[in-house]
Image (spheres, rainbow, N blue to C red):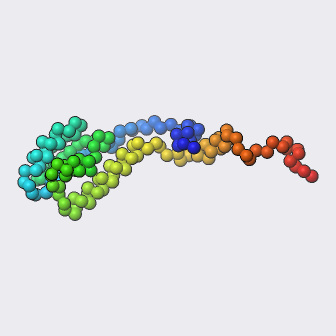
Amino acid sequence: MRRETAYKLAGRHHDHPIAGAGLHKEREIRFAALPPDQTERALQALRKLKGLVVSEAARPRTLMVRYSVLDYTLESLEDALREAGFHLDSALYAKLVRALVYFCEETQRHNLVSPERLIKQSNEVYINVYDQHPHGDHDDTPVELREYK
């Protein structure tokens, strides 16, 4: 049985009160010390992307980016910068933060496209499906003839 069918049979509604909660992110992109002018070049390159707000951060060699998870992820932005020849900070702390952010955003995007899980009333769904489909477990013999004494 398809998941959508199970939801319909159970009478589930998928109206979320806060549909877009947590979709807008504000992240730092940190660059390596060399080459020295790459932060300014990256700022100009990222400003050309629609739906992405880029600004200089208080820290040196750092840009602040604001975006919707539906449009961009930090991983896609940083991969595009690497492919364009920019060098990102390779310190252990930066790598750990990156890995955590990549995982969180990927999980959030996956959860946004996945339907809500059926938790309650699952037994009723399968009972209804079982009753509606023919199968070999029905005995057409009348009840009085089944009880042989």
* In-front residue for pair 59/61: 61
Q: Residue at x 11, y 49 (%)?
A: 39
**Residue projecting furthest to the right:** 149
Q: Residue at x 58, y 38 (%)?
A: 9
Residue 12 in percent (x, y) is at 53, 38
Give the left or right position of residue 127, taking residue 47 as reference: right
Q: Residue at x 88, y 49 (%)?
A: 147
Residue 110 in percent (x, y) is at 39, 47
Give the left or right position of residue 7, taking residue 74 as reference: right
Is residue 7 visible in the rendered image? The answer is no
Quarter holding the N terminus is top right
Residue 127 in percent (x, y) is at 65, 44
* In-front residue for pair 66/58: 66
Is residue 38 visible in the rendered image? The answer is yes
Residue 134 in percent (x, y) is at 70, 41
**Residue projecting furthest to the bottom:** 92
